[in-house]
Image: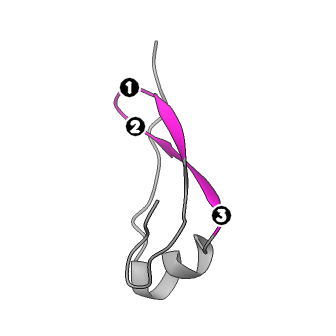
Amino acid sequence: MKFERHGEYMDWWTEVQYIFTLGKTAKVTDFETGKSFYIKRTLGANHADS
């Protein structure tokens, strides 16, 4: 089984903290295995508690 590899680097300070806001859910996928899981941001100011 072959998995498509894609993704991009995103900076926490200028992008991610505004996209992955408190209460949002995100899907995390491992590029090597294709396995994925969901996380939810619950707290954090200079980071994400998920």
Q: CA distance from mark 1 to mark 2?
A: 6 Å
Pointers 1 and 2 in contact (C-beta within 8 Å): yes
Q: Earlier in the sequence, mark 3 or mark 2?
A: 3
**Left or right: 25 as drawn, with respect to 14:** right
Q: Which residue is mark 1?
A: 33
In the picture, residue 24 is in which quadrant?
bottom right
In the picture, residue 19 is in which quadrant?
bottom right
In the rendered image, residue 10, in percent from the top left (x then y), is placed at: 43, 71
Q: Earlier in the sequence, mark 3 or mark 1?
A: 3
Q: How is the image coloured?
A: one colour
Q: CA distance from mark 3 to mark 1?
A: 25 Å
Pointers 3 and 2 in contact (C-beta within 8 Å): no
Which residue is more in the foreground, 40 or 11?
40
Q: Which residue is mark 2?
A: 30
Which residue is located at x 61 percent, y 73 percent? Answer: 22
Q: Which residue is mark 3?
A: 24
The magenta span reads 23-38
- Work out whether 1 lies above or below 43: above
Circle 1: element type: loop
